[in-house]
Amino acid sequence: MKSATPKVLHEICGRSLVGHVLAAARELEPQELVVVVGHAREQVAAHLAEIDADARTAVQEKQKGTGHAVRMALEELGGAVDGTVIVVCGDTPLLTGETLQRLAATHAADGNAVTVLTAEVPDATGYGRIVRDEASGAVTAIVEHKDATEAQRAIREINSGVFAFDGRLLADALGRVRTDNSQGEEYLTDVLGILREAGHRVGAAVAGDHREIAGINNRVQLAEARRILNDRLLERAMLAGVTVVDPASTWVDVTVTFEQDAIVHPGTQLLGATHLAEGAEVGPNTRLTDTKVGAGARVDNTVSVGAEVGPQASVGPYAYLRPGTRLGLKAKAGTYVEMKNARIGEGTKVPHLSYVGDATIGEYTNIGAASIFVNYDGQDKHHTTVGSHCRTGSDNMFVAPVTIGDGAYTAAGSVITKDVPPGSLAVARGQQRNIEGWVARKRPGSAAAKAAEAVSRKPEGES
């Protein structure tokens, strides 16, 4: 990956690679889930503790092969275990729980000692081929590409590296795996031959989509997997009644949820725990993270993090909602409006060019254009409260802490530093003074002076 980040911690669609694998494995409801860690194990173990506290870790001090890794996992569990052991790779984020369930079901139904998850691929170059017995369909060998005959190279069924084992037989066979190979490692695939030679059946289950078994080894493959998974998520949403106008430019995380008749316009990213309620319309060119959008709400050209947009509310274009923002029913955060830790009541509008930080605004209030809620004194943040049915003028500053009572008005251009009683009009600005003839005296000969002089020469009433 050419990265300081361990490969399995790279993310696609809101989860790490290993996080996707764990999520699929959890769908099996296993009695125990063990992750083998080696390279950068401190980082990986810390991440596992965050995303799946019940997962156990087994340390592979030295990377001595896949068979050795599985042996470390069994040692973490105390040795041989009863039942089925499923082995998966930590860099296969497209693998689904449904496919793992089919693997486990095939393993049990066929009475296999080991069942290999395989896939039929368009081009099998470089992969280990699955060789089967023509009569029984049992797997007789996994032949690496370099060792395959011409006939075997024509086989398109390949090994995925995902297996289901009988737990007791697996432990016994791992004890007999040798390291007399070019790498000096314990290969898990050698277990298949050991079990077959002992008279046990080796079977296979074919994945429905060969892309599920794809491992990630570089940034190109990471991007390809992200596209595949994103398409899968959008298809699921559209089949559930969501309109995605342009899937090619829409990106979602696996944790995003929708209700039917939601509409997503082009250039939209829906991330984290974002939820779109019924009839919500989002985009274009919008990024929502951990944001709830209520039924029938409209969010246009907006960035939002940790906010809640109420039913039938309107946001944007070009708005920025920061954590703690809550818009009530039919509320509005308009063009070039930024909000942070603000609660906006039902029907209240902040239409234009304003910053509302650390504030509570009641119902059906209108905040004038270019208003600033001055919440920071250089050391601490303070709160502003504006009541219901207020009308505040344009270009106001509310210097917190301050309270505007219900039904109050403030004049345009005011700097409000004191509480305003309910029903009052607050005016906090200097009175206008006109200095007659100032341009002629201070800017003689200028275009402004000539324009003013021309007006003064016109007869009264002439336009």
Image (cartoon, rainbow, N blue to C red):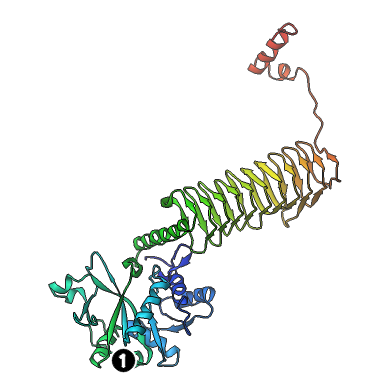
Tell me the SS state at disc 1: helix
Q: Label 1 is placed on what type of residue?
A: Ala
Residue shown at the point (44%, 93%) measured from the top left: 78
Quadrant where the N terminus lies?
bottom left
Residue shown at the point (39%, 67%) measured from the top left: 94
- Which percent across, then down, holds residue 243? 48, 51
For this orientation, the residue located farthest to the left is 150
- Which percent across, then down, holds residue 463? 69, 10
* Residue under label 1: 173
Q: In this image, 370 relative to 125: left or right?
A: right
* 202 w.r.t. 391: above or below: below
Could you say which quadrant of the image residue 107 lies in?
bottom left
Could you say which quadrant of the image residue 140 lies in?
bottom left
Q: Residues within 10 Å of mark 1 (few under 14, many from 20)?
A: some
Q: Can you see residue 65?
A: no
Q: In this image, 352 relative to 421: left or right?
A: left
- Which percent across, then down, holds residue 328? 69, 52
Could you say which quadrant of the image residue 59 lies in?
bottom left
* 27 w.r.t. 223: above or below: below
Residue 234 or 42: which is nearer the viewer?
234
**Numbered marks: total:** 1
Q: In this image, 237 relative to 375: left or right?
A: left
* 222 w.r.t. 181: above or below: above
